[in-house]
């Protein structure tokens, strides 16, 4: 017959379980804080007027009205019907545009590390490490490929006009006689 050696269990001290759970909670909060701090910064986008349809991508060119301000309200830039590729804005502005819809109006706040950081444009009223605030209206957007195709068509039409080969243009074959000046 085998004999089993028994180890007596010690009683748990009063309040030890509570302390154990508090320790687990503290470790979980610390881990969550470290994970949150490791997240990359993102711009905040507040919808003022909802738009419709899809959102632009990095491969699109947007047409926007915008006003750029420092957090104290000082306007540093403003433009109407401004066309620009999404990929050519500061990273925070590009990310915010990709959350917008055609016809919508938005307020965005871009953390400095997604704007100009420590090196704002020379001669700009933007101080180093400044968070930026924008009011943006997304008027329209098109893919860069679509715009390039339209430009090629316009260039071809201009060349044809210069050569007199556009049907209906004065002096073009089939255009009929040129009007006589009195």
Image: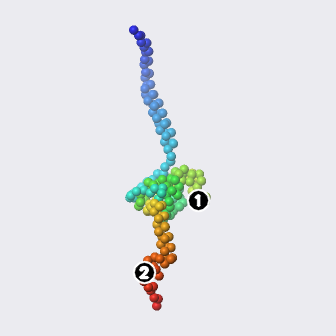
User: Which residue carries the number 1 mark?
Assistant: 124
Which of pointers 2 and 1 lies earlier in the amino acid sequence? Answer: 1
Image disc number at residue 109: none
Q: Residue at x 50, y 39 (%)?
A: 34
Comparing 132 with 159, the one in front is: 159
Specify the farthest residue to the front: 173
Q: Position of residue 25 (x, y in %)?
A: 45, 33
Q: Give the quadrant of residue 49.
A: bottom left
- Residue 1, x across and y down, in percent: 39, 8
Q: Residues within 10 Å of mark 2 (few under 14, many from 20)?
A: few
The quarter holding residue 106 reads bottom left
Name the residue beneath numbered marker 2.
174
The type of colouring in the image is: rainbow
Residue 72 relative to residue 8: left or right: right
Q: Residue at x 44, y 15 (%)?
A: 7
Depth order, front residue of 174/41: 174
């Amino acid at each position: 017959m085998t004999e089993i050696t028994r180890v007596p269990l010690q009683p748990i001290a009063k309040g030890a379980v509570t302390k154990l759970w508090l320790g687990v909670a503290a470790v979980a909060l610390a881990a969550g804080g470290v994970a949150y701090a490791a997240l990359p910064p993102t711009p905040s986008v507040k919808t003022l007027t909802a738009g419709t349809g899809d959102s632009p991508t990095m491969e699109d060119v947007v047409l926007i009205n915008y006003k750029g301000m420092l957090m104290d309200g000082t306007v540093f830039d403003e433009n109407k019907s401004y066309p620009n590729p999404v990929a050519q804005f500061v990273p925070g502005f590009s990310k915010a545009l990709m959350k917008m819809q055609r016809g919508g109006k938005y307020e965005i706040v871009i953390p400095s590390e997604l704007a100009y950081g420590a090196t704002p444009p020379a001669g700009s009223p933007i101080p180093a490490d400044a968070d930026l605030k924008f009011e943006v209206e997304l008027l329209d957007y098109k893919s860069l490929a679509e715009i390039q195709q339209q430009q090629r068509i316009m260039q071809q039409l201009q060349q044809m006009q210069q050569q007199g080969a556009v049907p209906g243009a004065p002096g073009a074959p089939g255009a009929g006689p040129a009007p006589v000046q009195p």
